Image (tube, rainbow, N blue to C red):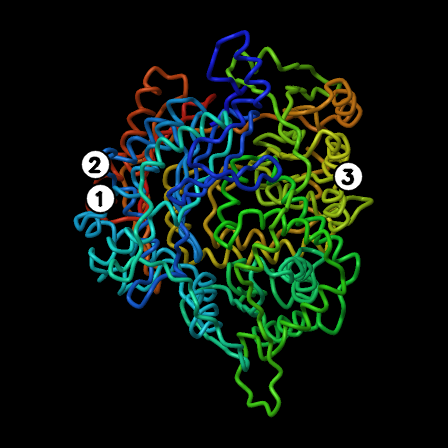
Amino acid sequence: MRHATRSNRSTNTGPLLLLLALAGPLAAQVPSGVTKGASVEGITEYTLQNGLRVLIFPDQSKPTATINITYLVGSRHEGYGETGMAHLLEHLVFKGTPKHPNIPQELTERGARPNGTTWFDRTNYFETVPATDSHIDWALDLEADRMVNSFIAKKDLESEFSVVRNEFESGENSPFNVLLQRTQAASYIWHNYGKTTIGARSDLENVPIERLQAFYRKYYQPDNAVLVVAGKVDEPKVLDLIVKKFGAIPRPIRSLERGNIIFKTYTQEPTQDGERTVSLRRVGDVQLALVAYHVPAGPHPDYPAVQVLAHLLGNAPSGRLYKALVETKKASASGSFDFVFKEPGLLVGTATLRKDQALDDASATLVQTVEAVAAVPATAEEVDRAKGSLLKNIDLLLNSSGNVGLALTEWASQGDWRLLFVNRDRIKLVTPADVQRVAQAYLKPSNRTLGLFHPTEKPDRAEIPVVSDAEIVAITKDYKGNALLAAGENFNPTPEVVDARTTRSMLPSGMKLSLLPKTTRGNTVNAVVTLRFGDEKALSGRSTPARAVAPMLSRGTVTKSRQQLQDEFDKIKAQVFFGGTGNTLTANISTTRANLIPALRLTAEVLKTAAFPAAEFETWKSAQLSGLETNRSEPGVLATVALARRLTPYPREHPLYNETIDEQIANLKALTVDQVKGVYAEMVGASYGDVAVVGDFAKDSVAAAVGELFGEWKSPKPFARLKRQFFDVPRFSEKIETPDKANAVFVAGQNLKLRDDSREYAALVLGGYMLGGGFLNSRLATRIRQQDGLSYGVGGSINAQSLDSVGAFNASAI
């Protein structure tokens, strides 16, 4: 929803233009009945007469617009017998209106990227569409219409409740998810934050349609909604369109007689007065420990220090939990995170253990390490590292109007959208003393959910402060924010435009370089470095060490440790992800113009001088084994592996051989760091690689830097792509039993002798899309999910290789 320029609606000349100039730009005028509110860093708030709040965020640098309508209702607002109602209603709102009877079909036809999500404090619906007048008009019309005209019909409830139940059962397959739910429930005795948004199974199955309709009519109203339009839009034009679409919806008359008054939630969780514990016993292959503490809500001044606290505990490899649990081999993985809510939330620490590790010892260490922060103050280095990481993520978020449009949802549901920026500014001010004060206030045994209850003569309790609406008004009053970020150009990414703008060259090493400079919002730039290595013969029997090269790259170079690399990337505000599949390594870089060359230099150091530290290798190996052992009883993983082994039966030594879970575990246990080093030293170089850079950068400087970094780095051995083979597989059927897993998984496939330039390919792809693609409106989804309500997820597709005559049809359901 972005237009390249603003234009006055009158094309008259002469005296009229002079009068307009004297009166101020017409584009700055606000439609009658609309109140203009705060404007912060390019985002402006308006309020319609019916109470609808509107946030407009123009961004001309992308060809799309995101329309996000948020209703200030979530599981926090549900009453007795209503658990899961907000989420169930989210599903039914996709079932259509008289004007838009087939919403999934309309979304698919317009190439929208849509979804709806439900959380504790809000429900939202969004779609990202091409920024044309017709697409924006349609998206706003859709959201305005289904605000008050959705069917919410009994026949739709009868099919959809079983889909939601299917989704419920899917979550029940994960021991971590279930343990987190149980721990959260034990942490809250009265408050609805102790109940999951998916709801109770009995409520899902028995809720009367009349109660759901009343819930919809009460909360889905303009005075309880926030509309965000972010992207390529002309602000005055889209505001007029919003008034046209939403302004006709009347503000509801709220009264006790009508039963539609929205009362403020007033249940406060009482101060926790002793340790609590919860045990979960189910089939599984790893052990887990969680510890949770009540902490203040997102708007509270203490919350930024809670964020820093969670980071310094859970970060890997410098975090205190990682050092206390993973480096000592008491656990295979650890972490920490916080829930940010409108009302007091939780800080959670986690530990994952293999079966041969001691749960009692790890649990005790987990608790001791978290609560020790109160006595062992956070260092300046720990706090600066956490702040750098948190602020980097916020800076990168603000460079994407679409992501900002969605992030505003979370803070608006906490009281005011400007809290996003207030929180950022508060993080900058956090000190080690703040972190220790917060730890002393909240990380107390009496505020913990994990252990046993011990009668205490003088209980030491944590009082959790709350934030009033008046305090939020005071916090955000007259807030101006930082200066606007640099705007991006109106770039039309057609193949012809991309090709004309791109400069291509080859380095002496053989590496290819492609550069596409363009101005972007916030001077952002993205780069991808790709290295290809080895061939079928060289990689025969060495798939396991070859797969280990990519995840080990960023764990240390000859001059820098893993933490030093992480700190350096944070310092230059660069997100760099190292990965790889088969015999390919990739480094994906996201940063800004000023930091691109430093990011390329640091990335090149990682790729060229990876050290593969033995200690880091062992911790990575332990974490991988833990994940594989979890997969031993996961229906989806087992079914997918079994299908792949039947459809592509490569011999055991072939690099494309599909290992069973047990084979993967055995091979990983036998793997040594020297084997990984061997693959890297013998095969990895730049001769068969590519570097592609797109965004705001100086072309000549970047070309020179890439030439310096990769121009002389040649591959020790030749590369040849791994050729795929077509297998004519006879029909088969296999059933795998997974005890104590409520949710079953179905997968199916058929090999096709097909390339993506075959005469039949286009028709097959379209057929596969109609059968199993799209958004809830394929033939499979319409029958199995929409009509019969049998599966939350169902789909199918056709795929084919570009160079080998190897394709497949795949289908799946849960």
Residue 641 visible in the snapshot: no
Q: Quadrant of residue 502?
A: top right
Question: Dot 1, crowdedness within 10 Å: few (<14), some or many (≥20)?
Answer: some
- Residue 548 place in picture, x, y as percent: 62, 45
Q: Nearer the viewer, residue 76 or 766?
A: 76
State the separation of the CA atoms marked 2 and 1.
8 Å
Q: Earlier in the sequence, mark 2 or mark 3?
A: 2
Horizontal side of residue 747 vs 8, given as left or right = left
Q: Earlier in the sequence, mark 2 or mark 1?
A: 2
Q: Earlier in the sequence, mark 1 or mark 3?
A: 1
* Up-down relation of residue 538 to residue 82 (above or below): above
Amino acid type of the residue tagged 1 in the rendering: Phe
Q: Nearer the viewer, residue 7 or 309?
A: 7
Looking at the rendered structure, the number of numbered marks drawn on it comes to: 3
- Residue 616 place in picture, x, y as percent: 70, 54
Horizontal side of residue 162 vs 611, given as left or right = left
Residue under numbered circle 1:
151
Residue under numbered circle 3:
609
* Up-down relation of residue 792 to residue 777 (above or below): below
> Are dots 2 and 1 in contact, CB under 8 Å?
yes
Q: Which mark is residue 485?
A: none
- Residue 242 place in picture, x, y as percent: 40, 33
Disc number lying in front (2 or 3) = 2
Horizontal side of residue 374 vs 345, given as left or right = right
Q: Which mark is residue 98?
A: 2
- Residue 490 place in picture, x, y as percent: 56, 20
State the separation of the CA atoms marked 1 and 3.
61 Å
Residue 627 visible in the snapshot: yes
